[in-house]
Image (cartoon, rainbow, N blue to C red):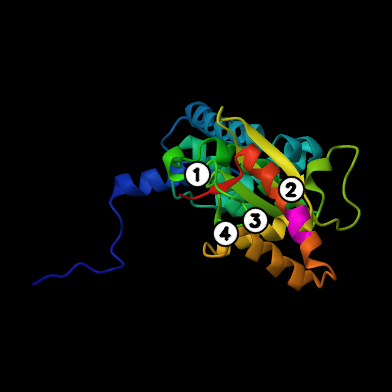
Amino acid sequence: MNSVSPKAEKPAFIRKQLEFAAHIRHPGINPAPQDIEPRRMNIYTELFYNNIENFVSTAFPVLREITADDDWHAMVRDFMYRHRCQTPYFLEIPEEFLDYLQNERKEMDDPPWLVELAHYEWVELALSVFDEDTDDQAFNPDGHLLESVPRLSPLAWPLAYRYAVHRIGPDQLPEKEEPTQFVVYRDDNDEIHFLEINPVTYRLLELLNQDNTLNGRQLLLRIAEEIGHPDPDAVVDAGHEIMQDLRERGILDIAR
């Protein structure tokens, strides 16, 4: 019985498809298929690149603005060449680009804050299309924040960066690290908000993500212990006010 060799040559039409796709990904490295008219091949190549570049530049406007044209197009081309997208949806191309920056980008001249800026810009799109059923019946609007167990809304994401990414622009590039924390959240009107918070508030939201058994008072007392505050009750009082503000914004609430 004849067996098929694992190294058997691919059918001609598959080889042609691979040549076609490889050239579109990076025409500077991969030659075009010989039997396709160059003019037509160029149309496909330009159309594909322009579509991808448009999605990326729209999703990362600040990153695009602060990047020189040649560097930007080289980055997008490298993304197309190096990265293998795991989704067919155009809307998810920005997430694929972020994954490329985080895990595959090899350019050593990139500024150290580039990935954080890209993540900060991507979050707004990601949360705007995030599909999460938030059942209002599951929360108690009258629950006591200190004596009940608070829950973080699935539409509120705590973020921590080493750089002040929200201030980055053509005329203001970071010269040193400046740790910055946010909570980005989607309100009842599906509008996205970025709220800059201090490290203590960030730690509160972080604990809410980690432990859903402690009530509000216990959470604040734990934070007071962690930071070695001499007056834990003062932390509880201040934290209670912060929690009330977060509840009004829809960032946290009390489970029934």
Left or right side of 1 for 82: right
Q: Distance between the residues labelled 3 and 4?
A: 6 Å
Against 173, residue 110 (above or below) is below
Q: Residue 209 carries which label?
A: 4
Q: How crowded is mark 4: few (under 14 residues within 10 Å), some or many (20 or more)?
A: some
Q: Mark 3 points at which residue?
A: 205
Please report the bounds of the magenta region as a residue range: 235-239
Tell me the crowding category of disc 2: few under 14, some 14 to 19, or many 20 or more residues within 10 angstroms, Cα based: few
Local packing at callout 3 (Cα closer than 10 Å; few below 14, some 14-19, many 20+) is many
Residue type at mark 3: give it: Leu
Do callouts 3 and 2 mark residues in contact (Cβ within 8 Å)?
A: no
> Which one is nearer the viewer's eye here, 102 or 244?
244
At label 2, the amino acid type is Glu
**Spatial CA span between label 2 and label 1:** 18 Å
Task: Read off the residue under disc 1.
Answer: 140
Relative side of 209 to 63, left or right:
left
Residue 173, label in figure:
none
Q: Is residue 80 in view from this perspective?
A: no
User: Mark 1 is on which residue type?
Assistant: Asn
- Amino acid type of the residue tagged 4 in the rendering: Asn
**Is 57 part of what is drawn in magenta?**
no
**SS class, disc 3:** helix
Kind of element beneath mark 2: helix
Q: Which of marks 4 and 2 is nearer the N terminus?
A: 4
| Residue 153 screen position, x and y as percent | 55, 47
Q: How many numbered callouts?
A: 4
- Asked if labels 4 and 3 touch by Cβ distance under 8 angstroms, the answer is yes
The dominant secondary structure in magenta is: helix
